[in-house]
Amino acid sequence: TTSTTEIDIMNKLGYSVLLLFVSNIMAWWQLNGQFLFNQNKFWNSPMLMSIFGIPVGYMFWWATKYSYDHFGFTWNIRMIGFGIGTIVFGVCSYVFLKEIPTLKTVICLLLAISIILIQVTNVIK
């Protein structure tokens, strides 16, 4: 059986990854919504988009804290965050902006997945 501490530690990694996905999706919209809604004053306002960055930064902060609690290092979250950010950016750009990935982009996405898997499975006790 697993102890409560082990479950809490795994939940922190799960929360961290979930927060990274949500915050990266929000960051994608914050930066790229302007290209979908050219005439919309909200998406084209640098001031409003800067304010929109406050909850995004808050979620990144918590993702970093939970990851550090899980791994005890900051490098892991940097690599996981890079991988998740790359995947979210690629998927959102494809789905919403209809940007078809090139072979080079697909290879980079596969590398991003590899980075995430290496970091998540590389736990030093």
Image: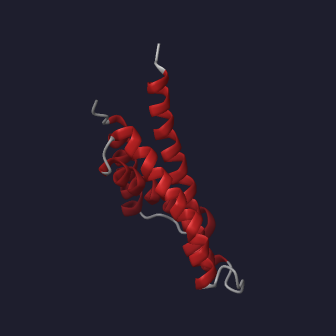
Above/below status of 8 relative to 111: above
**Farthest top residue?**
1
Res. 27 in view: yes
Residue at 45%, 26% (x, y): give it: 5
Q: Position of residue 109 (x, y in %)?
A: 41, 55
Res. 91 in view: no
Residue at 48%, 58% (x, y): give it: 60
Q: Position of residue 36 (x, y in %)?
A: 65, 76
| Horizontal relation, residue 15 to residue 69: left or right | right
Residue nearest the viewer, comparing 47 with 103:
47
Residue nearest the viewer, comparing 53 with 30:
53
**Number of labelled discs?**
0
Residue nearest the viewer, comparing 18 with 125:
125
Above/below status of 105 relative to 63: below
Q: Position of residue 4 (x, y in %)?
A: 49, 23
**Farthest right residue?**
40
Quarter where residue 38 is shown: bottom right
**Farthest left residue?**
124
Quadrant holding the C terminus = top left
The chosen color scheme is secondary structure
Above/below status of 68 relative to 97: above
Residue at 46%, 40% (x, y): give it: 13
Residue at 41%, 45% (x, y): give it: 67
